[in-house]
Structure formats: structure tokens, C-alpha cells
Amino acid sequence: MDQFKQTYFEECEDRIQDAEEGLSMMLDGDLDKDTVNRVFRAIHSIKGGAGAFAFNQIVDFAHEFETVLDFVREGKLTPDRDMCTLFLRSNDVVAEMLSLEQSKKTIPESIGANLLEELRTITSSMKGESAPAPSSEASNNDHPTSENFTWSIVFRPHEDMLKTGNEPYFILQALKELGDLKVTTETDNLPSLHDIHAEHCFIGWRLTLKTSAPEEEIREAFDFVEDLCDLEIAKQNVPPGDLPERRKAENRRDSDTPQARRKEDRDAQENAPKASKSIRVDLDRIDQLVNLVGEMVIAQSMLQEQVRWLPPEVGGKIGEGVEHLTRHMRDLQESVMAVRAQPIKSVFTRMPRIIREVCAAVGKDVRLTTFGEDTEVDKTVLENLIDPLTHMIRNSVDHGVETPSERQAAGKEPYGTIELSARHRSGRIIIEITDDGKGINRSAVLKKAQEKNLIPPDHQLTDSEIDNLIFKPGFSTADKVSEVSGRGVGMDVVRKNVTSLGGRINVASTPGKGCVMTLSLPLTLAVMDGMVVSVGSQRFVLPTINIIESFRPPHSAVSKLSNGVNVIIARGDYVRLVPLYNIFGIQDAVLNPEEGLVILLESDNGEKLAVMVDDVLGQQQVVIKSLETNYTNVKGISAATILGNGDVALILDVPGLSSMNASIDIIEEYQNALKAVGQIKITPTKKGGKTDEESAQEEDNKEDESAEANETNAIEDNEDHPPKDEDAEEGKLTHE
């Protein structure tokens, strides 16, 4: 049962989103029949499933909601903007009830109570306007004066109805509770015993029901199976005015021959909606598949590395096979990544509800527009986007957009606008949140930051640096703590979550016009294309999406500024030159840029950076291994990977490198990171670099001295120290 419930809740997520989208379209004035039916079907399906699991509170609320939507669907009610807002709030209540049921929590009676009364008021008013008085109905239609009517019901389930978990017995029981029920079983389609399948339904029923209940209540018994059966409901003792409809029903029954049914089945199949081409797969299975593909990519890289050392007469044919394998592996990897890719729409559809809640709390009117909802991103990235976007949207409404009176005084529309957009760029997903509010009050932000000792009092900051102070831990410009903001943790959480995904966040503000918050995130956290470079004896990987070009600069292109920073002329601009050997303390690297290579990089925000390496070893797909899992975050390093020769290499973080300088702390962090992922220890470079010949000679001397020392120590250990008792030493823990 728990498995069925979980499937139901997963399906409800999609239906809540469908209803949200349809209601948002209705709010914008789209009252097309298809739009209204879309919302109605979503709520109807949620109610049906809730009834199957005895979620009575959801059933009661959804039923009233569905009834009002039915009036809209039939054209009896034209909703205005206030009523559409009521529908959206009602959809939020259904979503909240589902969330509580999924968490196995009790739904408080207060949830949705006010909305339920509003829906009932609409229902009562509509029934009072459209339903004639009973005496008038009996007089005009010559109905019997008795309250009980006799109904003829034909119920023929489709063969696959039982597979959906629907049981005809419960439907017949529900009808029996309405009145006097007589049942006749149809067995014309019953096959031989050999052909009977336990999961198929081959029989139907003709029912005679005497009841005072209206037709709608009778049809409610078939709510769950409307699309899974052939159903006819007709009132007996039909007055003359209804004879045509009755005659049609009788003609349908008269034509109920096997030949006619086969023709009807063929027509139904031709006119039936296309079967869904999607299936639900547990995410753990997808993750397992992704991991296996990653290991295959590593194995393919190792095989490719080994083929290089084979003689041409042997390696030629094998090399061709490896090239074919490489191409197929790339296609396989892209296909597997596409399986994990999900439209960002599922996250965007949550935001209108957030805006409505915040607007209700702070007394503002904000409207949301979205673009790029079909932009796809990895499932893991998608799930981790919900909290950051929620905090950013709440911040924009609470701090960015003004109150209606303030906006009118400033010559703006009384309602604010927030634009949420997503797009792909250079192998990353870019998400922007733009508001037309008052922008960031930089003087207030700077003053608050100084009061909280987040920056030194005399520290000079640029406008961009002041804007980004809102991401500091504990920072808030709110005078008091409210249920919406004031604690100073929201935007700090945003930056931490985004950084943990390998992303970047930036804010740009224009006073009086609003601000733009930009998120830049990788499309996937599994595999990437990288350029393998060497720095001394170490190997690094640079993301290919960040690489502009590589070149060997002339002597005149390199200069040193007064603060000690090296710059290089690249494409007519002065670009900062970062020597990786200096930052990470690699002593056996090429020190002269003219003897090595310079790689020109561009970060997500367009900032250019040049890094100095010894050589470029090639381009390959690399499997991303989290460095945080094995060690911790290291500035300038985004992750680790395994190369084709089995060595571990670190993947460089281009934006992080741009803000780094050589320091012993960074060197030590780098050394510890290498140890954590299985690399060898690196000796930091001493101040005052040496030439290649000097470094090489010193390294040879150290190796010779180390070998002699080891040999001497081994001899001394054998002579001076007897063998240790292993039992005595058992249980001791040593750490090098």
C-alpha cells in the first residue's frame, strides 16, 4: 500500500503543477475551454486518488473546488481576477494537504477552512440561480410526485480497469448505499477458462437503482473509472420531452452486438489519446547507471592511454577500435545525461505560490513572468535549486519591490514585476531574477555591514562589492525580525548552496529601477570535457568551456605591476597572468613563460584570466569526483578526476583562480587535497625561484641523499633494534 501511496503522491506533484499553470493562464485572462478542463482534470484526479486512500479532508476540499470549476467549465460562471486568485489559493491548500499526508501528519481543520467556505458560497449561489424549484420541475416535466426515481445503469469495465487498482465491488457497494439496487451480470464476453486472465475484467453489469439521489451523486460512484469503462445512466419513467434521449440509449443497447462492439472498440482505439511514452524510474537506478557510465569512461581513457605505447603494426587496428569506442562512449554518456535532465519548469512553477504567500504577509502586489521553463538541467542540480530560488524570490518581494503607494509615488505601476528566466550558455545554465523595485540602498548596506563588523570601517568598496555584501553571513537590513526576513541567513544560504553545486551568484543593482541576481550553474555534476595540462610533475584539468586559446608568449608580452602581479598582453588587452606553480607550490615546473605555455581563460562573468602551464597533454572527457566528499572545499579547485593512466588530477576552478595569490596556507590546502585523493606529497617552492637546471640538480641531490639515508637507516635498524613482537604491537594505531 505504501508503494501505491508514493506513486500517487508523485503523480499529484505533476497534477498540482498542471493546475498551477492552468490557473495562472486563467488569471491572465485565458478562459479557453482546454485551459479550464486542464485544471478541472487535475483536481478531479487528485480527488479520485485521495478517495481511494481515504484522505477524506482532501476529498472534501477538492470536491468543492471541483464543483466550482465545473460551473466554469460549463460556461455558467465567468471568473474574474479575484476568483482566479481564490482558485490559486485553493490549489495551494490542496498541495499543502498532500504534503502533510505524505509526511503522515495530521491535517489541521483550520487549513483551507476560509477558502472552503468561499467555495461553498459560490456553489450555493450558483445552484440557487440555476436549479428550478422542485414543484415547478414536477409540474412542467410531469415527473412522479414521489422523491424516489428509478435509474437504469449499464456498467461495462474495460479489460485493463483492474490493473489500476479499481474494484467494481466497491462501486456497486457505493450505489447500494444510495437506495434499492438490483444487479444483472453480463457474461457475453466471458472467454473460455483457458483464456481467462486474473488481471482482466470480462464481465459487465446492468443495474436498476431506485433512489432519491440526483444523477450527479450517482455518477460520483464512477468518478475513478470514468475513462476505464463504458457507462450509461438513464432515468426510467422518462417524460415525453426526454424520449429522444431515451430512444438513443435504447438504440445503443439494441446495437450492443459482438460485431457492433468490435467496431466501437476499433473506433475507440483510433480516437483514443496516444499512450504515454514516458515511464517512472527510481532515481537511484539512474544514479547507478550514471556511475557505471562514468567508470566506463575512465576505463576507455585508460585503454586509449595504453594504445599509444603499442607498436604501429599492432596499435593501428586496436587504435581504430578504441576511436570507435570513444565515439560510442560519448554518445552513451550524452544519452545517460539526457535521462537525468529535467526541465526547470518544475522549479519555476513553485515560485508563484511563494510570491503569493510573501505578498500576503507584507501587503504588496507582485506579478511573476517566466521565460525558458523548458531549459533542461541535471536532476541533482534541479533539486538543489529550490531553496536558493525560494530565498531569492522572497528577498526580491520583501526588500526589492516597493509597496503600491511607494510605487505610485515614484511614477510606477502599483504592482511590481519579477522576471524569472533560464537559458543555456557555454555548457552552463544561467538563471536570472530581475525585479523592477527600488534597487539596493548601497549607503544603508555599507552602514549595516560596518555596524556588524563584516568589513573594516575605513575599507573602500566598489558598487559591485557593496551589492554583494548581502550574501555575507548574518547580514540583513531589516530593522526587525519577521516571518519573512530579518535573520540574515537567507542569502548566505543561497551562496553556500550555489557554491556547493560548483556555481556562482552575482547581483547587479540600479537605484530606483531594480536589481538582477544571476546564477551560473553546471548542467551536470557527473562528466565534463576537460583539457589536461601539466605543471611540473602534476596534472590538472581545465574545463574546455572556459578556454579561449593557448599560446607561447614573447618576452615583451609579459610585464609585472608595482604590486607584484604579472600581466600579459592577450588579444590586445592586459590580462592577469597566474603562475600555477607558484600558487600550488610545485617546484619542478617551468618558471619562464617563454618556455612554457599560457592558456587564456574566460570565467562565467566574462572576466579573462591567463594561467601558465608547462604543456598541454590533450583533451578528454573526465568523470567528476567530489573533492568535498573526500576532503573539503579548496579555493581554486572545483573537483577531482581519474586520468587514463590511473593518476588522480584536480579540476581547476577558473573564477576561484582569479582571486588567488600565492600563500603558504593555499599550498598546504593543496597538499592535503592531493593526499586525500591519493596523490603524492609536494614540497612548496621557496621564495626566490630557481632556474630549471638548479631545480633539477637539487631534486637529483635530494633523491640521492634520501636513498643513502634510507639505506643507512635500514642497516642501523637491523643492527641496533631486534624485531618487534607483532602481538605486543597489535592494537596500536599509527598515523603518518
Image (cartoon, rainbow, N blue to C red):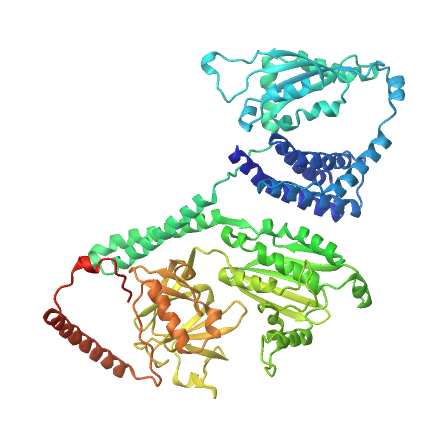
- Looking at the picture, does residue 413 appear above or below residue 201? below
Left or right of 345? Residue 654 is left
Q: Is residue 44 visible?
A: no
Question: Residue lying furthest bottom in this view?
Answer: 562
> Which of these two is toward me, 177 or 400?
177
Left or right of 28? Residue 466 is left
Look at 48% across and 46% down and name the residue there: 339
- Residue 92: horizontal and vertical position, in percent? 68, 45
Q: Quadrant of the C terminus?
A: bottom left
- Residue 668: horizontal and vertical position, in percent? 37, 73
Q: How many marks?
A: 0
> Which of these two is toward me, 67 or 596?
67
Residue 514: quarter of image: bottom right
Q: Is residue 253 visible?
A: yes
Left or right of 124? Residue 699 is left
- Residue 607: horizontal and vertical position, in percent? 52, 73
Residue 622: quarter of image: bottom left
Question: Residue lying furthest front in this view?
Answer: 728
- Looking at the picture, does residue 128 appear above or below residue 18? above
- Residue 154: horizontal and vertical position, in percent? 66, 16
Residue 507: quarter of image: bottom right
